[in-house]
Amino acid sequence: MPADAPTILATSAGFASDRRRWITPGPMFTEAIRLAEAPTRPRLCYLGTAVGDQLFRRAMVAESFQGTDVELSTLALFPMPSIEDMRGHLLAQDVVWVDGGSVAGLLAMWRLHGLDEIMREAWEAGVVLAGVSAGSICWHIGGTTDSFGPTLRPITDGLGLLPYSNGVHYDSEEQRRPLFHQLIASGLLPEGYATDDGVGLVYRGIELVEAVADREGPGAYHVTRTPDGEVTEERIEPRLLAP
């Protein structure tokens, strides 16, 4: 797969804690910028749709990038789109980063505002699409979500840029792995890839080329359904990113 193929970094990792600030960009952001082959002043647009475009969260993100070389922008949809030309703005980015939260709410708002089509266009144009949790599932066919309550439920209407299911927080939330297996076994979701906390999946086009991690220990997994309806899970060892 050529290095300039449409690229997605789908993760269970993102911002990290910081002693001086609330949050700091973790190694996944550095990896997303590397994948974009961005210039010395990379352009990154942050979307917090999945958390309702909370103002305090946007302020924390803005503070986290202060003093870096990243040219940060934010696209908010509440109470109305914060950027008039959303298509032009997103196509001009090196990286689009989508935060976690409600993937069901994210998908509904994106479709309402036509961002589903814009995201596909940006992906095909070479903008690296990246994100954590909801910002990982959204690029796939679907996955497991707490968008509807603490008992996880399936989400099956993702953007489908990637023809797989996606499991996030695979090692840290006890409902995730068994429900992911159940949904694939039943055929409600297609085969897919899952990530422990700290791990991301790098796709070029629709091909998974590697997993990456911001810490030692966690892994990624390829989960498939056999012809007799059994589920198999194969661990994918991630490449450790520099801190």
Image (spheres, rainbow, N blue to C red):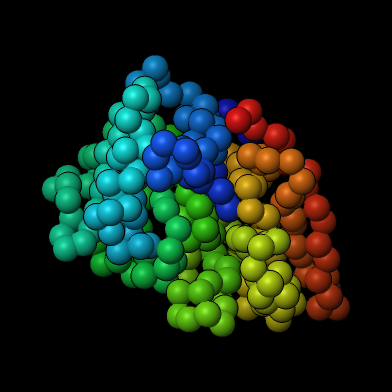
Q: Nearer the viewer, residue 231 or 14?
A: 14
Q: Position of residue 121 (x, y in %)?
A: 36, 46
Side of 61 where 131 appears, left or right: right
Side of 150 where 127 appears, left or right: left
Q: Quadrant of the N terminus?
A: top right
Q: Position of residue 105 (x, y in %)?
A: 36, 70
Q: Position of residue 34 (x, y in %)?
A: 52, 27
Side of 112 where 14 appears, left or right: right
Q: Quadrant of the C terminus?
A: top right
Q: Residue at x 47, y 71 (%)?
A: 157
Q: Position of residue 116 (x, y in %)?
A: 35, 58
Q: Residue at x 74, y 50 (%)?
A: 219
Q: Nearer the viewer, residue 48 or 130?
A: 48
Q: How many marks?
A: 0
Quarter-of-image position of residue 210 = top right
Q: Nearer the viewer, residue 111 or 61?
A: 61
